[in-house]
Image: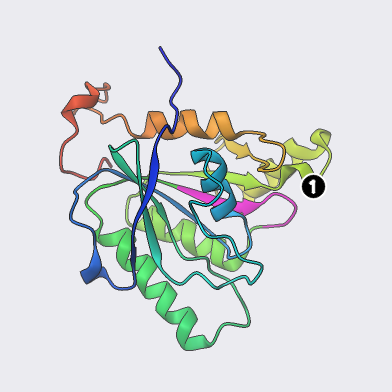
């Protein structure tokens, strides 16, 4: 079977409130994380389009939920980065309402990839995001970015620490990723491909043509 690839990607819309939700009705894969964790850069390298998602030297600039149509068949959703301390409290609260509202209301959300910096302990905001995902029954995978910043021999220790601090199940996979070195990007793409496969009531994978309208919980 051919590995999952992103062959075509296009920006569709930015959502500032839930009433602006796109009407295409496609399955959704979302990326969440701190404002400086590298979400936009990761989206660009996955899509092999370095102008697709805007990257900024100013953390916290993105305040929208951005939708990118991928292969004409699903949305890759870039959630606004959190944890930027210099943002006004009202702005931070607005981000939180928008993100939590999206997580609890999207009927098409299949999976969230929670990005954390491999070099540091998960923050309080990372833990809050993990709690939201668990509370709303959203499947998720943790991705440890910037793994090129530490020695490969230390990856396992750091990913195990992240799993422990986020209270993940024993043996839960945390994917180390480096955008500059292209480390982990194929594994992440394959994970997205698997997440998009709808499952039947007995847990078996159905034909990709039988995607239904329910969130795949």
x and y, in percent, of residue 58 in the image: 64, 72
How busy is the neighbourhood of tag 1: few (under 14 within 10 Å), some, or many (20 plus)? few
Q: Is 148 rendered above or below residue 132?
A: above
In-front residue for pair 62/153: 62
**In this picture, residue 152 sits left or right of residue 19:** right
**In this picture, residue 104 sits left or right of residue 213:** right
**Which residue shows up at 61% across the image and 55% down it?**
38
Q: Is 162 rendered above or below residue 127?
A: above
- Residue farthest top in this picture: 1
**Which residue shows up at 18% across the image and 44% down it?**
214
Where does the C terminus fall, quadrant-wise?
top left
* Residue 166 visible within the image: no
x and y, in percent, of residue 86 in the image: 63, 83
x and y, in percent, of residue 91 in the image: 47, 83
**In this picture, residue 92 sits left or right of residue 205:** right
Where does the N terminus fall, quadrant-wise?
top left
The residue labelled by disc 1 is 149
**Which residue shows up at 39% across the image and 28% down it?**
194
x and y, in percent, of residue 169 in the image: 52, 40
* Residue 114 visible within the image: yes
Q: Is residue 64 magenta?
A: no
**Which residue shows up at 63% across the image and 46% down it?**
144
Task: Give the magenta part as a residue range.
Answer: 113-121
**In this picture, residue 56 sits left or right of residue 81:** right
What kind of element bears circle 1? helix
């Amino acid at each position: 079977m051919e590995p999952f690839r992103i062959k075509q990607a296009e920006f569709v819309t930015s959502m500032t409130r839930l009433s602006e939700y796109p009407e295409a009705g496609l399955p959704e894969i979302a990326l969440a994380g701190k404002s400086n964790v590298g979400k936009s850069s990761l989206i660009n390298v996955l899509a092999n389009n370095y102008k697709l998602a805007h990257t900024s030297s100013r953390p916290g600039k993105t305040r929208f939920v951005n939708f990118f149509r991928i292969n004409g068949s699903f949305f890759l959703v870039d959630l606004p980065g959190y944890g930027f301390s210099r943002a006004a409290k009202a702005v931070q609260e607005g981000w939180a309402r928008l993100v939590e509202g999206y997580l609890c209301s999207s009927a098409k959300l299949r999976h969230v990839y929670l990005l954390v910096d491999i070099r540091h302990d998960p923050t309080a905001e990372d833990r809050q995001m993990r709690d939201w995902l668990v509370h709303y029954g959203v499947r998720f995978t943790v991705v440890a970015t910037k793994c090129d910043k530490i020695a490969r021999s230390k990856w396992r220790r750091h990913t195990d620490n992240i799993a422990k601090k986020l209270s993940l199940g024993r043996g839960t996979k945390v994917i180390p990723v480096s955008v500059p070195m292209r480390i982990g990007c194929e594994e992440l793409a394959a994970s997205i491909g698997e997440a998009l496969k709808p499952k039947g009531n007995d847990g078996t994978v159905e034909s990709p043509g039988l995607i239904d309208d329910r969130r795949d919980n």
